[in-house]
Image (cartoon, grey):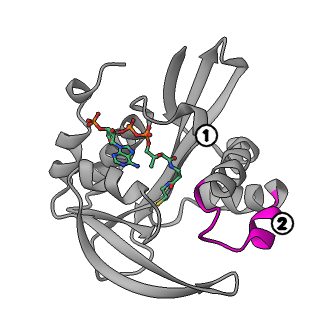
Amino acid sequence: MTVTIRRARPGDATSMARVHVAAWRNAYAGLLPDAYLANLSVTREAAGYEQGLAQARGGHAGFLAIADGDETPGGGVVGFVTGGFARRPGIAEGEVETLYLLDDFRERGIGRRLMRAMASHLASLGAANAFAWVLEGNPSRFFYERLGAKPAAREVIRFAGSELPQRAYAWDAIHTLLTATAASQKPG
Ligand SMILES: CC(C)(COP(=O)(O)OP(=O)(O)OC[C@H]1O[C@@H](n2cnc3c(N)ncnc32)[C@H](O)[C@@H]1OP(=O)(O)O)[C@@H](O)C(=O)NCCC(=O)NCCS
């Protein structure tokens, strides 16, 4: 299987929304209410991604992981990352807003490659540092820690009728993230 990374375009929104819905149902089972996850809609999510990419406000951009090979007949988008300048000031200048992979494509270095693309993008925007919000019960925080991020803030948000604690993980300098995701870290 070959996985390539490329910049997302507004026309990729439906493929991204499919990954979003599948990844949320998998990663957030037990964290978010079942009814909310069951009601997630590819059409609704696609509208949000399309608008975000088309407007590109605050340097917002996305990068896709596209797999080709026997495991994904016909190939297809198996993961993506989006981000730009922070939506709210205070923690760091750049923000990784979303990062999702289909379950079968985890632990193969694709998340790191997507983060490498986003780190380069944030650096090209001139962001000095970066962060990402992670739900406290989400083991993906260990992925961010592995890439050198440190817990920087905690807040409780109200989402889908639940009180959810989330933590911000921050890279105090963008080069920390660039180094942690450098190509030499993982072949392919
Ligand atoms: C988070 C996510 C994108 C990571 O992508 P991935 O492709 O599996 O990660 P990689 O294979 O690139 O891993 C990079 C390193 O992090 C480590 N790692 C990845 N996930 C980890 C986890 N849950 N716990 C501990 N370490 C982890 C890997 O072992 C690897 O370590 P190495 O440096 O020794 O090679 C993926 O697990 C995912 O999509 N999760 C579900 C959605 C989600 O929760 N997204 C985050 C929302 S904030």
Above or below residue 109? Residue 74 is above
Give whichever of 179, 33 is nearer the camera.
33
Residue 116 appears left or right of 20: left
Q: Amino acid at mark 2?
A: Asn
Ligand 1: image quarter: top left
Is 139 contained in the magenta span? no
Q: In the picture, residue 39 is in which quadrant?
A: bottom right
Q: Which residue is mark 2?
A: 39
Q: Secondary structure at mark 1?
A: loop
First to last magenta residue range:
27-41
Above or below residue 9? Residue 94 is below
Mark number for residue 131? none
Residue occupying image coordinates x 26% and y 66%: 170
Q: Secondary structure at mark 2?
A: loop
Q: Position of residue 12 (x, y in %)?
A: 69, 41
Residue occupying image coordinates x 32% and y 55%: 142
Is 36 contained in the magenta span? yes
Within-10-Å neighbours for mark 2: few <14, some 14–19, many 20+ = few
Q: Position of residue 123 (x, y in %)?
A: 27, 51
Mark number for residue 102? 1
Q: Quadrant of the C terminus?
A: top left
Tell me the chief SS of the magenta region.
Answer: loop
